[in-house]
Image (cartoon, rainbow, N blue to C red):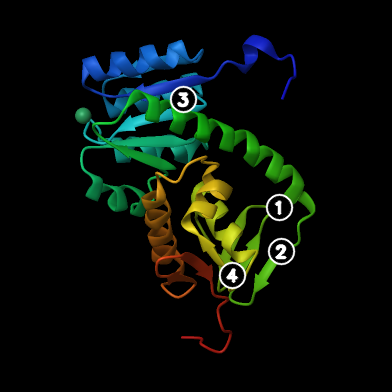
Amino acid sequence: MNNSAGQSDKRTILVVEDEPTLATAIAQRLTAEGWTARVCGDGASAVQAAAQLKPDLVIMDVMLPVMDGLEATRRITASRPVPVLILTARDDESDKVVGLGAGADDYMTKPFSMRELIARCKALLRRVERAKVIAKNSENEKVLDFGELVIDPSQRIVTMHGEEVHLTPTEFDLLTTLARKPKSVLSREKLLEEVWDWVDASGTRTVDSHVKALRHKLGPDLIRTVHGVGYAFEPPTDDTER
Ligand code: CA
């Protein structure tokens, strides 16, 4: 894109990390990329700062004083949609992070390389831009009606048995991507590319965690695991009312 919006295009990233050395290192790296970085050391001040700053992206540590990172993420994303990259201490925390539906779009396990962090940030920021284009293109996209499950891409609403199900933006994009091709197997790599706009396949666990979260919200049978390959959307059968 070569519009001439200039300075107003400068991205603001909120870094929430209580380890000062790490927080400073992240902020410096983000600034070097040409972004504006603001650091908060606890969850409560992060919620306040997010309301004032309206950041384009939030990098959030899980273990924080005053209010933990998941609760802070939940509050921040409840008031305004913003991509959140969560920093976890252990890899096995990732399912919990995504599964809690706190609004995390991606996560990284410490320790991580700054290069990787920047790559993830760029992908998340690209996703936001792309989501706007997709939303524009979906304005006239017809509703995906599977009986008990209805997906409305233009309104970004999912209903199950007539009741709206709250999905995070990432969950919605993942579900819609799968549901557009019922019964087709999509590889993790393909899903990463389509939903997360990743250029490499280093984050396939992110896909797995989000599929788990979707199954938790919509039932275990909608998304089938094809071992060693990926996932497929299985339209619900209408006669299994219970
Ligand atoms: Ca911490």
- The residue carrying pointer 4 sits among few (fewer than 14), some (14 to 19) or many (20 or more) residues within 10 Å by Cα, namely some
Q: Amino acid at mark 1?
A: Ser
Image marks 4 and 3: residues in contact by CB distance under 8 Å: no
Give the farthest residue toward the bottom: 239
Q: Amino acid at mark 2?
A: Val
Q: Cα distance, mark 4 to mark 2?
A: 19 Å
Mark with earlier residue (1, 3): 3
* Residue at the spot of label 1: 154
Residue 48 image position (x, y, % from top left): 39, 23
Q: Quick check: can you spot residue 65?
A: no
Q: Cα distance, mark 1 to mark 3?
A: 27 Å
- The residue carrying pointer 2 sits among few (fewer than 14), some (14 to 19) or many (20 or more) residues within 10 Å by Cα, namely some
In the depicted structure, whether residue 188 falls above or below residue 144: above
Residue 240 image position (x, y, % from top left): 51, 87
* Residue at the spot of label 2: 143
* Residue at the spot of label 4: 184
Mark with earlier residue (4, 2): 2
